[in-house]
């Protein structure tokens, strides 16, 4: 699963990244629910959750890369605008590795698949 934490979850999310599950029991940090498609565990407190099906595992020199297919999405109505997930309402927690800082999304820049249309040459 892919669980998108909100900024209000920063401390608990950081804790989970600091400690190893081999040494610390992190099962009580968040409440868990299970997806309807595959029974994948997801985090109740996260405003947006994606249930995935494992498609492929790629062995890397030091790790494994898991490739999944999204089979379902879960969120509360309070995070939707006109039936679509609203990132301003979700307020996702973002880790910026170069700064080693958690950040949040800023204001919109422009409409995707629209802003660049003026650069398309007319035939």
Image (cartoon, helix red, strand yellow):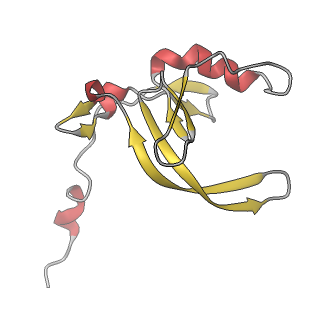
Q: Is residue 50 above or below residue 55?
A: above
Instruction: Specify whether 71 is left or right of 57.
Output: left
Quarter placement of the C terminus: bottom left
Instruction: Specify whether 78 is left or right of 3.
Output: left
> Could you tell me which residue is drawn at 21 percent across and 67 percent down?
119
Q: Is residue 50 above or below residue 22?
A: below
Q: Quadrant of residue 13?
A: top right
66, 119: nearer the viewer: 66
Q: Position of residue 105 (x, y in %)?
A: 39, 31
Residue furthest to the left in view is 122
Q: Position of residue 71 (x, y in %)?
A: 45, 53
Quarter placement of the N terminus: top right
**Number of marks present in the image shown:** 0
> Could you tell me which residue is drawn at 32 percent across and 28 percent down?
76
62, 71: nearer the viewer: 71
Q: Is residue 118 above or below residue 31?
A: below
> Could you tell me which residue is drawn at 59 percent across and 14 percent down?
11
Q: Position of residue 35 (x, y in %)?
A: 49, 40
> Could you tell me which residue is drawn at 27 percent across and 41 percent down?
109
Q: Is residue 14 above or below residue 60?
A: above
Instruction: Specify whether 4 is left or right of 79.
Output: right
Q: Position of residue 52 (x, y in %)?
A: 53, 49
């Amino acid at each position: 699963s892919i669980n998108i934490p909100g900024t209000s979850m920063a401390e608990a999310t950081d804790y989970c990244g600091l400690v190893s599950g081999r040494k610390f029991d992190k099962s009580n940090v968040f409440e868990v629910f299970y997806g309807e498609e595959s029974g994948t565990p997801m985090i109740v407190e996260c405003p947006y959750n994606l249930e995935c099906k494992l498609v492929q595992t790629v062995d890397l020199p030091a790790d494994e890369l898991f490739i999944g297919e999204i089979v379902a999405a879960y969120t509360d109505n309070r995070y939707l605008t006109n039936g679509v997930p609203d990132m301003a309402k979700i307020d996702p927690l973002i880790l910026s590795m170069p700064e080693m800082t958690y950040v949040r999304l800023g204001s919109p820049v422009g409409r995707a698949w629209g802003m660049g249309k003026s650069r398309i040459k007319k035939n």
